[in-house]
Image (cartoon, rainbow, N blue to C red):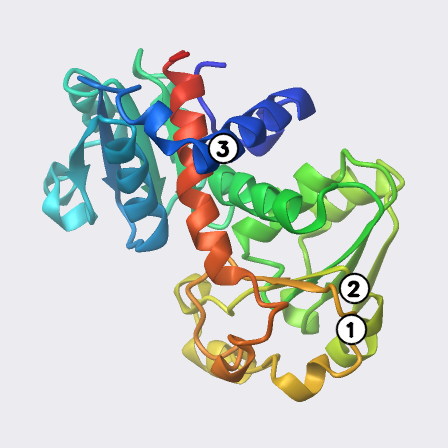
Amino acid sequence: MKHLIDIMELTVEEIDEMIAVAKDIIANPDDYAEKCRRKKLATLFFEPSTRTRLSFEAAMYELGGNVIGFSEAQSSSAAKGESVADTIRTVGAYADIIAMRHPKEGAPLVASRKTIVPIINAGDGGHNHPTQTLTDLLTISREKGRFNDLTIGLCGDLKFGRTVHSLISAMSRYENVKFILISPEELKIPEYLKQEVLVKNNIEFVETTDLEAAMPQLDILYMTRVQRERFFNEQDYLRLKDSYILTPDKLENAKEDLSILHPLPRVNEISTAVDDDPRATYFEQVLNGKYIRMALILKLLEVK
């Protein structure tokens, strides 16, 4: 594997291998402290990020490597009109591996064709976010111990939510997984995803607007924010942004071993009163992101 642009480029076996490495890093961090000595990661973030960018940087530092890059397009030559292809060719001369976030769908794929160093898609528009999906999978593995026989509720912005799209694709390869898709009518999952992944693979799914009715069935609840930056019309955003707010009373009929995930950042779709509930795993999920990105960097750099 040379690059990671889409989660479906990884086989189930490769995902299992990276999850095993991530768990070993958690158990034996000192064994990995010099694995990437003298290696450089470039973080090219043409769009704002906190967790993804910092977790990539923390991952590389904890592997003994170094980090170069920028955190917004305006602090790069993109502000002068430089193309993605030229930026990637330039940075590829300085770095051993590149993590790239871009607001335009497909930009990391274009970048991967213009450089000899590995490219990691750190999120491209409303399209894909494969390393968030790896984070989600590591979290599910640590919380549930399995990927099969699960009912997963995905709630909020399912139309533009790239983390949702990637997670549905990844989990579609496991047996007896059911999806309950909870969203306003305007933010339902794209038709292509429904047809090409769910219907094509005979995966059971239900579309609903009622979170509380779905709650008792769920093994995993994956909350998402309504993304202001994906809307062209401010009035539409304001009308939909508070469609779902998870509060302790809405968890009264939930399973005792429910796992609540969220890719973060949250706005107000999960009340802070839920944070102390033992079923809330979204801050553990953040930490898992660092470990799985460490495993991914090792894999792409072919470091043993």
Residue 143 location, x and y as percent? 65, 51
Residue 41 location, x and y as percent? 24, 28
Mark 1, Cα crowd under 10 Å, few <14 / some 14-19 / many 20+, is: many
Q: CA distance from mark 2 to mark 3?
A: 26 Å
Q: Which residue is drawn at the image coordinates 74% and 41% (left, top)?
A: 147
To which residue does mark 3 refer? Answer: 22
Q: Secondary structure at mark 3?
A: helix
Q: Secondary structure at mark 2?
A: loop
Farthest-out residue, bottom:
249
Q: CA distance from mark 1 to mark 3?
A: 31 Å
Q: Which residue is drawn at the image coordinates 70% and 45% (left, top)?
A: 193
| Residue 106 in view | no
Q: Which residue is drawn at the image coordinates 42% and 31% (left, top)?
A: 28
273 relative to 51, above or below: below
Asked if disc 1 and disc 2 are in contact, CB closer than 8 Å, the reply is: yes
- In primary-sequence order, the first of circles 2 and 3 is 3
To which residue does mark 1 refer? Answer: 215
Residue 237's disc is: none
- In primary-sequence order, the first of circles 1 and 3 is 3
Q: Is residue 29 left or right of residue 182?
A: left
Please state which of residues 304 and 202 is positioned toward the viewer in this rendering: 304
111 relative to 69, above or below: above
Q: Is residue 238 left or right of residue 184?
A: left
Q: Secondary structure at mark 1?
A: helix
Residue 96 quadrant: top left
Residue 228 quadrant: bottom left
Q: Amino acid at mark 1?
A: Met
To which residue does mark 2 refer? Answer: 218
Residue 5 location, x and y as percent? 48, 29
Residue 233 location, x and y as percent? 44, 73
Q: CA distance from mark 1 to mark 2?
A: 6 Å
Q: Is residue 279 left or right of residue 300?
A: right
